[in-house]
Amino acid sequence: MSSGQISASQERVSRQLGELPTSLEVVCKLMMMLRNPTQENEQVAEVLMTDRELTMRLITRLAMKDREKLQSASKNLSQSSDSSLMATLFDSVLHMGYKAILRLVSALSVGQILAPEFRGYGYQKRDLWIHSVTTALASQRLCEVLIDTNRPSQDPSLGFIAGIMHDVGKAGLNYDLAKETQKVTTELKNKRMLWIKLEKEICGIDHCSLGAKLVKQWKLPKSIIDAVKQHHNPKASCQLGAIVHLADYCARFINPTGGVGNFRCKIKPEALEYSGLTSLDIERVIAHALNDKETINLYATT
């Protein structure tokens, strides 16, 4: 289709982002910072302070998780001075740790993009967000499996970020696909067309390519941009893309959600070769995640 349609899809997502109470660029910067266990707490707090609304919502959410230690600090936030907020943030980051902060920041930002109903894809409310969280955690775990067995790997935190962002392009295509529900259902039911090809025919671009454009716009690293773009067609040049491809497959068994053609996603054999993983690794990650649904539920709460 026309480049105008592609621009319209990007504009649709940009408009959604503009309605969020947080800046995605700030959130993505935080994601990159929080992956570093030696990051200074003060620097994390300083970045959070560049988005006061995110700061207040984060402290409030932290207070909900630990009322005894943090609730008093969240009172009258709108009247708090910057120095007072900074002190509260510093204490919160110190107390909760980077993983908890990353989880909450993700839910307060990306979660709001992916949590609505996606009628064009057959997703009920929160289905796509839960799938994205599950993929992110599976991707992180697959990276850790490679590290634990002394095989070449990727930074697990990059795996998490790539996984959580892998389907963000669907936010821009949902509107156009929803207008063609009958065609989408018929084509997929009769197995005449795969999702990627169907997206291109109706929208002029697939969700992988649109997602890559978006994460590039949000200034995430090239490895994540490539992984988002290639997660359905992994390339030898991008191990992270192959890992996310496998994590996407795992997620469909760990947390089966709605969605048209959910189980039609198959592992591409080359993904195992490019990632360095085996079928046994995949089975173990799925089994591990099935025994740890609590972690997925914590991340998925928006």
Image: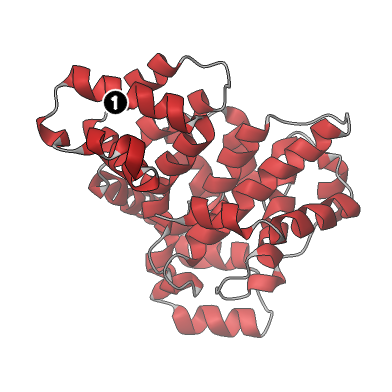
Mark 1 Cα shell of 10 Å, populated few (<14), some (14-19), many (≥20): some
Residue 2 occupies which quadrant of the picture?
bottom left
The picture places residue 271, in percent across and down from the top left corner, at 81, 48
Between residue 93 and residue 263, name the one nearer to us: 93
Relative to 292, 203 lies left or right: left
Tell me what residue is drawn at x 60 percent, y 46 percent: 163
The picture places residue 282, in percent across and down from the top left corner, at 82, 53
Tell me what residue is drawn at x 42 percent, y 27 percent: 93
| SS at circle 1 | helix
Between residue 130 and residue 195, name the one nearer to us: 130
Q: Is residue 264 visible?
A: yes
Q: Is residue 205 visible?
A: no
Quarter holding the C terminus? bottom left
The picture places residue 297, in percent across and down from the top left corner, at 53, 58
Q: Is residue 53 above or below residue 299?
A: above
Residue designated by label 1? 88
Between residue 167 and residue 28, name the one nearer to us: 28
Amino acid type at image mark 1: Thr
Q: Is residue 252 above or below residue 247?
A: below
The picture places residue 26, in percent across and down from the top left corner, at 36, 30
Relative to 220, 240 lies left or right: right
Tell me what residue is drawn at x 70 percent, y 71 percent: 264
